């Protein structure tokens, strides 16, 4: 179990996190979300032991995670991180980047293990390619595979799929998160992307103004976002009479005493997102068809 116990941290004099506490059981996936600058990466770095906490404790099982003041070599064997800087060996091939740390542990099965990891991150066609010839997204996938190489007990992922194109993202996410679940690797993911969270995280934690303002399963937070900021993570929403409603919870109907004027229709793939002027408030309504600007519509809240 990872236990974060009442930690606070500041860069010089600027407080970033205050009195943060949570725990996560082995093999679980925890998503950390929050606005840019809310301290997600900082929290991951503290868990990794890259900085010293000002106050509080971080424990993995019975081991206290110590920062550089108390730990000469930053990091622990049981934990790996994939940061925004991938830190790979540029003139070495993909398979040797991944295999670099394996030799002592996987003498016989080294190549088999490398092939397994290359398959998880879908880089079969680039196994022999030097990393310097790869795109940003491909490098990110090598970094992921390398972090998994020695089967860490815990993995810290900072925006793990941010450089990966949409064509690859969906299958790669499933591969990586399913692999972590299968191997019971505990995972903490900092992300802006709801698709990294919805189908995969066991729990979510929302950072806001140096604190955790909300915590629960994705399902719980989605159904009951409590504050607009949490709702905004999941999609377009409206605050009507003090209540939060997602765009799909408003429906265009034949007649209703709720009326508005269509301002714009945005194509969304499966539906259109209508921007509607409702009593001088702009609201969003999901609708299956495009409507003309200026059209008066009736809607209900479902
Ligand atoms: N090395 C540093 N020195 C001083 N301040 C820093 C340092 N790294 C981050 N900060 C500041 O700490 C705050 C939190 O940054 P952090 O990178 O943890 O946020 P984040 O939530 O991960 O943001 P993003 O989503 O943009 O990656 C920000 O205000 C940032 O400017």
Image: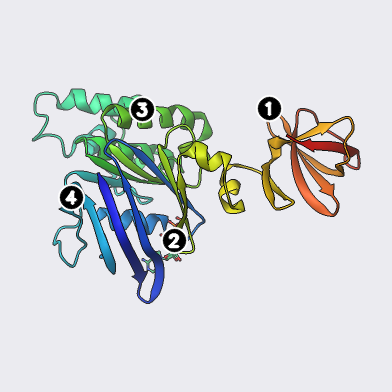
Which sits earlier in the primary sequence, circle 3 or circle 2? 3
Q: Nearer the viewer, mark 4 or mark 2?
A: 2
Residue farthest to the bottom? 13
* Between marks 3 and 2 in the image, the one whose residue lies nearer the viewer: 2
Residue bearing the label numbered 1: 270
Return the mark for residue 76.
4
Q: Earlier in the sequence, mark 4 or mark 2?
A: 4
Q: Does residue 283 lie above or below 256 as drawn? A: below
Q: Residues within 10 Å of mark 3 (few under 14, many from 20)?
A: some
Q: Secondary structure at mark 3?
A: helix
Quarter of the image with the N terminus in it? top left
Q: Which residue is mark 2?
A: 211
Task: Measure the C-alpha gap from mark 3 to mark 2.
Answer: 30 Å
Residue 28 location, x and y as percent?
33, 37
Circle 4 packing at 10 Å, graded few (<14), some (14-19), many (20+), is some
Q: Position of residue 61 (x, y in %)?
A: 19, 46
Q: Looking at the picture, how far across and down is residue 285, in whole percent?
A: 75, 39
Label at residue 178? 3
Q: Secondary structure at mark 1?
A: loop
Circle 4 SS class: loop
Alpha carbon distance from label 3 to label 1: 27 Å
Q: Is residue 136 left or right of residue 2?
A: right
At a point 45% along the width and 26% down the height, the residue shown is 171
Q: Do the CB atoms of the residues marked 3 and 2 lie less than 8 Å apart?
A: no
Pointer 2 local density, CA inside 10 Å: few below 14, some 14–19, many at least 20: some
């Amino acid at each position: 179990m990872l236990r974060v116990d009442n930690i606070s941290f500041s860069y010089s004099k600027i407080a970033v996190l205050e009195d943060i506490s949570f725990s996560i059981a082995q093999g679980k996936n925890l998503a950390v979300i929050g606005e840019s600058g809310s301290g997600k990466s900082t929290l991951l770095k503290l868990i990794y032991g890259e900085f010293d906490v000002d106050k509080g404790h971080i424990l993995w099982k019975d081991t206290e995670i110590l920062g550089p003041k108390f730990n000469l070599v930053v990091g622990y064997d049981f934990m790996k991180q994939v940061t925004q800087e991938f830190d790979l060996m540029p003139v070495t091939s993909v398979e040797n980047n991944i295999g670099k740390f394996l030799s002592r542990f996987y003498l016989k099965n080294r190549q088999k293990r490398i092939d397994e990891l290359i398959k998880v991150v879908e880089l079969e066609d680039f196994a022999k390619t030097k990393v310097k010839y790869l795109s940003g997204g491909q490098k990110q996938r090598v970094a992921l595979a390398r972090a998994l190489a020695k089967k860490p007990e815990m993995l810290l992922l900072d925006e793990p799929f941010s450089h990966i194109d949409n064509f690859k993202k969906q299958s790669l996410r499933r591969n990586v998160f399913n692999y972590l679940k299968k191997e019971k690797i505990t995972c903490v993911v900092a992300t802006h992307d709801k698709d990294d969270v919805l189908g995969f995280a066991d729990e979510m934690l929302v950072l806001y103004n140096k604190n955790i303002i909300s915590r629960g399963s994705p399902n719980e937070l989605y159904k009951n976002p409590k504050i607009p900021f949490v709702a905004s993570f999941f999609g377009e929403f409206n605050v009507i009479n003090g209540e939060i409603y997602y765009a799909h919870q408003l429906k265009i109907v034949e007649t209703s005493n709720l009326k508005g004027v269509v301002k714009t229709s945005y194509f969304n793939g499966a539906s259109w997102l209508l921007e509607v002027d409702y009593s001088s408030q702009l609201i969003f309504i999901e609708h299956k068809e495009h409507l003309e600007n200026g059209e008066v519509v009736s809607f209900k809240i479902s």
